[in-house]
């Protein structure tokens, strides 16, 4: 595989945000781009780059989003989820 093909594959496997991950899919946190205080709090709760998580469910109006990570459940507002970059393999 050529270098540019690898980059294309990488881009296809990187979702823009946690908000884009479908219910039931697993993902890996790439980065957290919230304000400093919120980023620190999310890190304290275990939402660090490299952490694997699964989207369990989304409320009917899309807010909040329930995640399962590190053997516990965490709910995030969609505004927070939209600031978290993740990588996941889409199901085909």
Image (cartoon, rainbow, N blue to C red):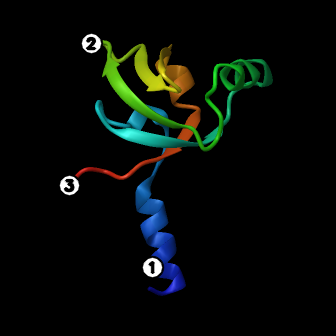
Q: Position of residue 20 (x, y in %)?
A: 39, 37
Residue for badge 2: 60
Name the disc covering residue 92, or none: 3
Quickly name the residue at label 1: 5
**Foreground: disc 3 or disc 2:** 3
Q: Earlier in the sequence, mark 1 or mark 2?
A: 1
Image position of 65 with respect to 21: above or below: above
Tell me the element at label 1. helix
The vertical placement of 13 against 66, above or below, is: below
Q: How far apart are labels 3 and 1 at the CA level?
A: 19 Å
Of labels 3 and 2, earlier in sequence is 2
At mark 2, the secondary structure is loop
Asked if labels 1 and 3 touch by Cβ distance under 8 angstroms, the answer is: no
Q: Residue furthest bottom?
A: 2
Q: Is residue 63 left or right of residue 81?
A: left
Q: Quadrant of the C terminus?
A: bottom left
Residue 81 in the image: state x and y as whole percent: 51, 27
> Tag 3: Cα neighbours inside 10 Å, few (<14), some, or many (≥20)?
few
Name the residue at 38% across, 37% down. 21
**Quadrant (top left, top right, bottom left, bottom right) of the N terminus:** bottom left
Q: Secondary structure at mark 3?
A: loop
Real-space Cα distance between discs 1 and 2?
A: 38 Å
Please, is residue 64 above or below residue 46 in the view? above
C-alpha distance separating marks 3 and 2: 25 Å
Q: Give residue 36's position: percent from left, percent from top.
A: 79, 24
Query: Badge 1, how many Cα within 10 Å: few under 14, some, many 20+?
Result: few
Q: Nearer the viewer, residue 65 or 25?
A: 25
């Amino acid at each position: 595989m050529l270098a540019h093909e690898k980059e294309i594959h990488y881009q296809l496997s990187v979702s823009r945000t946690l908000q884009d991950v479908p219910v039931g899919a697993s993902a890996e946190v790439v980065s957290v781009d919230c304000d400093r205080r919120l980023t620190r709090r999310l890190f304290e709760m275990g939402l660090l780059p490299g952490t694997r998580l699964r989207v369990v469910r989304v409320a009917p109006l899309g807010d909040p989003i329930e995640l399962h990570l590190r053997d516990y459940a965490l709910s995030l507002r969609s505004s927070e989820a939209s600031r978290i970059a993740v990588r996941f393999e889409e199901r085909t």
